[in-house]
Amino acid sequence: TEETLVLVKPDGVARGLTGEILRRIEAKGYSLVDIKLVEPSRDLLARHYAEHEGKPFYEPLLEFMLSGPVVAIRVAGNRVIEGFRALAGTTDPTTAAPGTIRGDLGRDWGLAVQQNLVHGSDSPESAARELEIWF
Ligand code: ATP
């Protein structure tokens, strides 16, 4: 079994979609190992998003992630890293496939950053690094 970090981003928490997102994770058969509501510091977010430093969406991304509480979840399951990314759908909510979290629930607000409801680790190395940062 494997673990991944899932974040319900501020848009998901503000829109009251945390329960719906947790429902989809549990319905898929994954286990919630740990969960907390966090108001992340700028320093924590800079560590989490270190790979994006210098990109055009980096500052808007940090501002967005600082705009309200985030739900951090440690999720376990067989191939959960790949599996949660399939549940989440692709980055851009406009073209994310229907049936996915972003495809069904995500909106394109026309802002400088994609407010796409969730984050999921993209590799075992990222999952280990990110779980250490958030938990
Ligand atoms: P995926 O890896 O499936 O694309 P992700 O959430 O892991 O999704 P990252 O590439 O790690 O995406 O980017 C982190 C976040 O930065 C995205 O979820 C999104 O909020 C924002 N973002 C990424 N690329 C862009 C972009 N080109 N324009 C605006 N925002 C972006």
Image (cartoon, grey):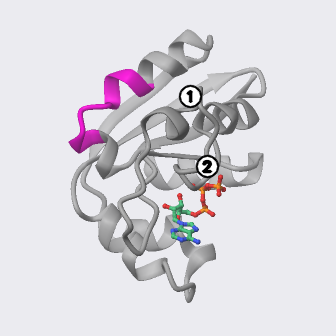
The residue drawn where x is 42% and y is 70% is 61
Number of dots carrying numbers: 2
Q: Is residue 95 above or below residue 55?
A: above
Magenta-drawn stretch, dominant element (helix, strand or loop):
helix
- Image quarter hosting the C terminus: top left
Q: Residues within 10 Å of mark 1 (few under 14, many from 20)?
A: many
Secondary structure of the residue carrying numbered label 1: strand
Residue 45 is covered by the magenta coloring: no
The residue drawn where x is 34% and y is 62% is 65
Write down the quadrant of residue 16 in the picture.
top left
Chain part drawn in magenta: 13-21
Task: Report whether 41 appears left or right of 9.
Answer: left
Q: Quadrant of ligand 1?
A: bottom right
Residue 95 — which label? 2
Residue type at tag 1: Val
Who comes first in sequence, dot 1 or dot 2? 1
Secondary structure of the residue carrying numbered label 2: loop
Residue 117 screen position, x and y as percent: 42, 45
Residue type at tag 2: Thr
The residue drawn where x is 44% and y is 50% is 134
Residue 64 screen position, x and y as percent: 32, 66
Residue 75 — which label? 1
Q: Is residue 8 above or below residue 57?
A: above
Mark 1 → mark 2, Cα distance in angstroms = 26 Å
Q: Nearer the viewer, mark 1 or mark 2?
A: 2
- Image quarter hosting the N terminus: top right
Task: Report whether 39 appears left or right of 46.
Answer: left
Q: Is residue 106 above or below residue 126?
A: above
The residue drawn where x is 58% and y is 31% is 100
Nearer to me, 132 or 48: 48
